[in-house]
Each structure stands twice: as C-alpha cells, then as structure tokens.
Image (tube, coloured by chain):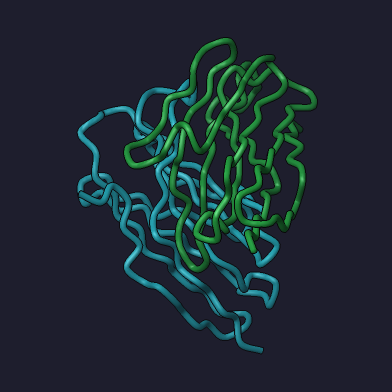
Amino acid sequence: AQKITQTQPGMFVQEKEAVTLDCTYDTSDPSYGLFWYKQPSSGEMIFLIYQGSYDQQNATEGRYSLNFQKARKSANLVISASQLGDSAMYFCAMREGRNNAGNMLTFGGGTRLMVKP
Amino acid sequence: GAVVSQHPSWVICKSGTSVKIECRSLDFQATTMFWYRQFPKQSLMLMATSNEGSKATYEQGVEKDKFLINHASLTLSTLTVTSAHPEDSSFYICSAPQQGSTQPYAYTFGSGTRLTVV
C-alpha cells in the first residue's frame, strides 16, 4: 500500500494567488515526521517545511504552511502569494520513527506546480 | 549548514561499463547514507541504505551485485553501477540524516547525478 499519496500530478496557479498541494499518508507508527521538498528542474531537493506527529500547531515557514490534520492523516502544503520561481515539482515525504537516525524518507509521487504570470 | 557533495553531476557512459558516484559529507559525519533513484517524471525510490563500516541494505528488487555501495568512512559513501545498461539511465541522489545538529529531523541531500547509458 502507498504510504504517501499525492493525488494532484499537476497544478496551475496564478501568480500572487495561494495554492494547496495535497498529501495523505499511512502509518501505524505513533512517531513520525512529515516533510515537503521542492525539486526544480536542476534536480536538487530543497527542504521547505517539517511537521512532527506530536506537534500541536501547524508548521509555518515564510510563505509555506502545512495544514496538518492528524485524524485524517493529511499534511497539505499551502503556498501563499505564489511566485514564478515556485514552478517546480513538490514532494511530500514521511519518516517513521522518533528521529532521523537510520530512518529513511518515503516520498509521494509528486505534484508539478506551474505558476502562470 | 550541513553539505553533502555529490559527484559527478552528470555522466554519459557506454553500455557495459561501470560508473562510480560519490557522496561526501563535508562538515558532518554521515554514519548513514540513503541512495535514491528517480526516473523521469517519477518520484524518488529508495535503492539502498549504507552504514559506515557495514554492508549496505538493499530494497527489494534492487540487484546488490549490480549496484555496489561502499561506506568505508564517516564522510564518504559511493555507489558503483556495474555493467551499466540503458535501462539504468536515471537520476541518482544520496541523502544523509544530520545527526547532532540543532535540527534533528533534517536530511541533507546531494545535488544528484544524472546517468545516461548509451
């Protein structure tokens, strides 16, 4: 079974508007972490935001916020005020376990975001 | 911040030859290195996990005799694609968990290697 599901293969958003990228996950481990990465055409993986399973508040990092709904097992990324430079692939990922020591990241299928001028 | 230097960035090789990809942690000790493969327009799939001083653990379906992983030191992990074939053409990227940093949840990625086998 898929552990991380991103149901939007591609999305368009108008510049300066907000956009939500969906991510649902599946795990039986009570301790886990959820990540979002941006991958431009160069291939590098750019860390955007992190949410721990025990975190009470939704994570925010500048224009990025994570809408964490634990009961629904969803961790949607919200990008506010989209910019042309936001056009890229976006991956949701999960780490099972209390920390990263020895624990891999499992990635979703990705969402290609295209920002229109 | 923590940096993992990955080389080469891209490589073209002839079918049947071997290619070595290096990932070097520059300012931290990487006791673990994760190796991922990404085919065009697809996600990152874990190939193997290497731990310093021990044998790598390969994911199901990954040929350990074809993808040789060595993690002989705390700062260097290598992936050698042996007898490469066109179907091995892909983007290979390494990732090391940052241990002992102020962000215990962080992972540092190499910049990736685009392998083309002709």
Name the quarter where the C terminus of chain A is drawn. Answer: bottom right
Residue extending furthest toward the front: B16
Residue B103, relative to residue B93: is it above or below? above
Q: Where's residue A81, x and y in %?
A: 61, 73
Residue drawn at the location 24% of the way across and 38% of the way down: A27
* Residue B93 in the image: above or below residue A96: below
From the top left corner, tell me how far across and down residue A11 is, in percent: 46, 79
Q: Is residue A26 above or below residue B85?
A: above
Give the image location of residue B4, x and y in percent.
72, 34
Can you name the residue that lies furthest to the top here? B53
The front one of A86 and B25 is: B25
Q: Colour of chain A?
A: cyan
Horizontal side, residue A49 vs residue B64: left or right: right
The relative height of residue B117 versus residue B113 in the rendered view (above or below) is below
Count how many numbered circles sit on residues in the image. 0
The image shows residue B23 at horizontal and vertical percentages of 70, 33
Q: Residue at x 49, y 68 (%)?
A: B41
Q: Residue at x 26, y 29 (%)?
A: A30
Specify the quadrant of the image occupied by residue A52: top left
